[in-house]
Image: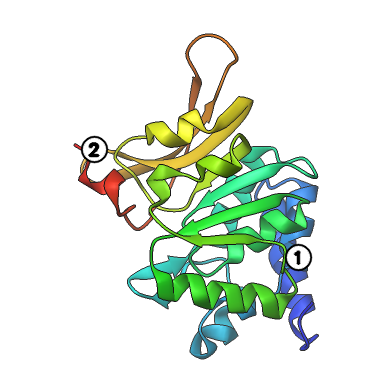
Amino acid sequence: MAENEDWQPQARALAETLAADGINERIAQAIARVPRHLFVPPELRDRAYEDCALAIGYEQTISQPYVVASMSQLLEVVSGARILEVGTGSGYQAAVLCELGAEVYSLEIIEELSRSAAAALHAAGYDSVHLRVGDGSEGWPEAAPFRGIVVTAVARKAPDALLEQLAPGARLVIPLESGPWAQWVWRITKRAEGEPIWEKVLPVRFVPMTGRARAQP
């Protein structure tokens, strides 16, 4: 998908590292197909295939590939599933979801980031992603219900609107604050009847979710 083919051995090596760390083959192969260097600033492209987070401006980061892979794995994406991403950032997570066959809707509150993500996704060949600038805590009601929702910023609590926009049996994967310093990724599965199932999965470090979610106690 990228004009420069030199990135592919690096991407495959990254995928092999992730597989060795417990990421399943389907997710690892999706990671191997994404030209991550197109989603980082030009001055950091020599580090694009390191398993680490990198700054992308506006006090935001492109997430560590292991975290992107883990959160994608928790969603259990099936081909054709409609997935909402809250926090487009660089567009990298959206690209991975596309490689898994998802129909991706992605919200970003910072307009400049949304524009740069659109350019990166286009350059990489992912033109089917639906992008919108807006407060991610409100979701995308007219496109709901979603078979999965992934949030790429830490929140104090899971926004009610996102839980409401999940289809029965679908999953919300979201980092939540746990005390003053700790953050954990949670998977919340919506049941057709009864309370949702909450699973505490992975310690992480994300930038804060802004907008209405940040104003909530």
Locate residue 53 relative to residue 49 in the image: left or right: left
Q: Residue 7 location in percent, x, y?
A: 74, 81
Where is residue 40, by image quadrant? bottom right
Q: Residue 190 location in percent, x, y?
A: 55, 23
What coloring was used for the rendering? rainbow
Instruction: Name the residue tied to disc 2.
Output: 179
Instruction: Name the residue tied to disc 1.
Output: 32
- Does residue 65 sit above or below 196 in this rendering? below
Where is residue 121, by image quadrant? bottom right
- Callout 2: helix, strand or loop? loop
Where is residue 57, by image quadrant? bottom left
Locate residue 145 relative to residue 111 in the image: left or right: right
Q: Hey, what amino acid is under mark 1?
A: Ala
- Callout 1: helix, strand or loop? helix
- Does residue 3 sit above or below 150 in this rendering? below
Determine which of the numbered discs, if any, sits on residue 104 in the image: none
